Image: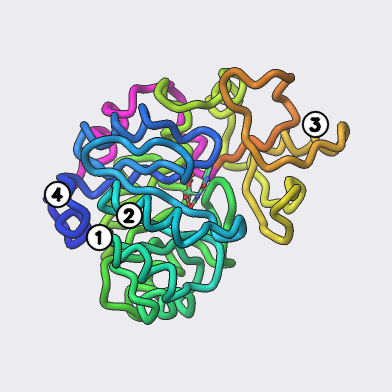
Amino acid sequence: MSATRFTNLVGCALPVQLAAMGGVGTTELAAAVADAGGLGMVPSGTQPAGGACGVNFLMPFGPSVDDIAAAARQCRVVEFFYADPRADVVAAAHDAGAIAGWQVGSPAEAVAAEKAGCDYIVAQGTEAGGHVRGGQSLDEVLAQVLSSVRIPVVAAGGIATAERAAAVIRSGADAVRVGTRFVASPESGAHPDYVRMLLAATADDTVLTEWFSDGWANAPHRVLRWSLAAAQETGWRATAPPYRGVDRTPSDMAMYAGMGVGDVNLSQPAAEVVADLVRLL
Ligand SMILES: Cc1cc2nc3c(=O)[nH]c(=O)nc-3n(C[C@H](O)[C@H](O)[C@H](O)COP(=O)(O)O)c2cc1C
């Protein structure tokens, strides 16, 4: 079983969405996921891949309607995160010919996204790496979102194995969204030190904090505890994760990681990750 309401909607073969990842989400990574049958995603400002690909906008940074429309003309999918859902930006994506999605952290936010005209929702649990929108575990928020909306629902947060992917799809999710496991893929833009730390970490090595807050305050995010401890010593608070080629020692940069990190023990090409994630579907 591979086709779902989500794959039909966005035009990919497998129910796997690459998480949009500011700072480390490259065109190459999105292309590799799309070529393997999933939906690739890039953060706004990064060239989208050909094929099934979407562009993600972080609302705290105030994207313009022109930028949203430009992305929507290039890609089938435009997606938003970290603000109350807004009908005007959804309409901007629709008017320029794209499908619109919103990553949410609660059933109330999911209902608001559906009312704003979204075509799909990402339900994010607190296990997620990076910025965390809500306060419920994935199983809790997924169940409540599924009973609150009619549009397709993608599950996100701590999913790193075929077993977990199959379990959330059995629970009713139309696809899985995976971030941390793809950070370790060679196609990502992550700094090698960041990848090494991910491969060594377990769920207990992650922590939710609001420390990395320059330009984006009051927004909890899950990172590796070691990077938080280092940043609290140096005072580093920038939100960018350690990226390849950064011209400083990256140990105190925000090493975003979800609670599935304990199952990420290998730097695997993205195509292999996609194939493994759908193994039990
Ligand atoms: C390095 C990193 C950067 C992220 N950047 C974004 C982003 O720019 N936009 C967004 O919607 N979500 C972002 N997220 C959150 C993901 O969309 C998703 O919720 C999360 O990766 C799922 O949990 P997982 O990492 O355990 O798979 C990011 C996550 C990570 C790990």
Label 4 secondary element: loop
| Labelled pair 1, 2 in contact (Cβ < 8 Å) | yes
Q: Residue at x 52, y 51 (%)?
A: 128
Label 3 lies in ligand 1 vicinity (Cβ under 8 Å): no
Mark positioned earlier in the residue sequence (4 or 3): 4
Q: Amino acid at mark 4?
A: Ser
Label 2 secondary element: helix
Which residue is identified by label 1? 97
The alpha-carbon separation of the residues under discs 4 and 1 comes to 26 Å
Tell me if I can see residue 187 in this picture: yes
On screen, residue 61 versus residue 147, left or right, reads: right
Q: Which residues are magenta?
A: 258-281
Tell me if I can see residue 125 in this picture: no
On screen, residue 209 versus residue 263, left or right, reads: right
Mark positioned earlier in the residue sequence (2 or 3): 2
Which residue is identified by label 2? 72
Mark positioned earlier in the residue sequence (2 or 4): 4
Q: Which mark is residue 2?
A: 4
| Labelled pair 4, 1 in contact (Cβ < 8 Å) | no
Residue 143: percent from the left, percent from the top?
A: 37, 71
Q: Amino acid at mark 1?
A: Gly
The alpha-carbon separation of the residues under discs 1 and 2 comes to 6 Å
From this viewpoint, which residue is outermost toward the front? 66
Seen in the picture, residue 174 relative to 188 is either above or below; the reply is: below
Residue 100: percent from the left, percent from the top?
A: 33, 63
Which residue is identified by label 3? 230
Q: Which mark is residue 173?
A: none
Label 1 lies in ligand 1 vicinity (Cβ under 8 Å): no
Label 3 secondary element: helix
